[in-house]
Amino acid sequence: MLDQKEINKFEDSWLAPYAMKSRNTRGRVHPGPEHPYRSVYQRDRDRIIHSAAFRRLEYKTQVFVNHEGDYYRTRLTHTLEVAQIARTIAKALRLNSDLVEAIALAHDLGHTPFGHSGEDALNEIMANYGGFNHNMQSLRVVDLLEERYPDFPGLNLTWEVREGIVKHSSAFDKMGELQEFLPDESATLETQVVDIADEIAYDNHDLDDGLTSGLINEKDLAKLKIWGNICGKISRKYAKIEPERRKYLIIRSLIDIQVTNLISETEKKIKRLRIKSHKDIKKNPEKIACFSSEMMDLRKPLREFLIRKLYCHYRVVRMSNKAKRFIQELFNIYIKNPEQLPPHIEKRIASDGTRRAICDYIAGMTDRYALDEYKKLFDPYEKV
């Protein structure tokens, strides 16, 4: 029977010495007995999957607004792709894949409707009131806003998963005031792996969605070395392959070469820096999970291409600006008359203040809910 004792034995025998083992957790804000057959990080993962915030990711935007089509990625499909890529890397490096999966599944829980344009709008509105950042909002969701358990607010996740949420990406550079998460220490290697898996996932699925939408084309992509090399190999091997299958094979290969390079380079760096424990990871100022310089040189033009050709495409800019107006107008009408807010949001005003309560409410909306709410509040013929 795989009980806590056997889980610890398995981790000791299988995980690398620098992996974050369950027994070394700093624990939870609200201590209590752990589950007899699940590690602390497995339990965190399960709490995240069963949360309302996780379900709402299905109708939150990546690049394309939800009603543009059902093929395009959402925050949920993106999150699942990040988790899959991160698990692959973690298992190859013998890291704690349960911790990796929990961080990956939670990393976007605080994202707004309408992608980064929604986040930008809320950050501008809240500029003089603490601002808005989706990493901090994700932490707020799991620490406070999810209401599922009678004994504590939020999901009461372990310190390591919460740290992984906060230190996700470079945005942590602006959050040094969060002393609880030791800003002078590096993130666990598990967190670093999720970080890069996130980059790999959104670069490649944005390519897929951009090609499907017709906003970018293969002719322009062929000028990029990383795309051209892979496309050439596939075309030589499958001379009569259909365009859709060729696109799929190229993107699959792009993910594969980046994941393979990351695993190889990270392993080299672990050996070079003589990393022996998870404490060595925390004390090392360098990021341990990394690409080779050659891969970085190949990735850079691809990322610049996406910014120039997709994210700055006039249709995407139109969608983004329209989304920002939705958010701004919703916020303004709520702030002028908070009695329009649902009762459970009004209750939070006493503890969090009117602006933060409204910010939390809007940030938790799906694209569809935000659009419906906008119609109810502004369309005179729409039932409220």
Image (cartoon, rainbow, N blue to C red):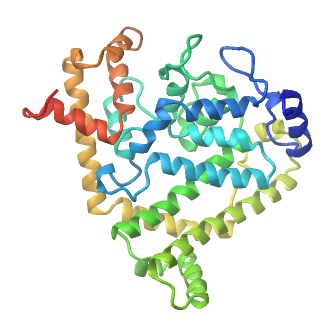
Q: How many marks?
A: 0
- Residue at 46%, 66% (x, y): give it: 207
Q: Quadrant of the C terminus?
A: top left
Instruction: Say above or below: 382 vs 261.
Output: above
Residue 363 on image: x %, y %: 38, 32
Q: In which quarter of the image is residue 365?
A: top left
Residue 9 shows in this picture: yes
Instruction: Say above or below: 368 vs 86.
Output: above
Q: In which quarter of the image is the N terminus?
A: top right
Residue 187 shows in this picture: no
92 sits left or right of 361 in the view: right
Of the pair 50 and 180, the residue shown nearer to us: 50
Residue 354 on image: x %, y %: 32, 16
Outermost top residue: 350
- Residue at 40%, 70% (x, y): give it: 211
Instruction: Say above or below: 377 vs 230.
Output: above
Instruction: Say above or below: 143 vs 116.
Output: above
60 sits left or right of 76 in the view: left
Of the pair 74 and 309, the residue shown nearer to us: 74
Q: In which quarter of the image is residue 209?
A: bottom left
Outermost left residue: 380
240 sits left or right of 316 in the view: right
Outermost front residue: 1
- Residue at 7%, 34% (x, y): give it: 381
Residue 223 on image: x %, y %: 47, 81
Residue 344 on image: x %, y %: 36, 15
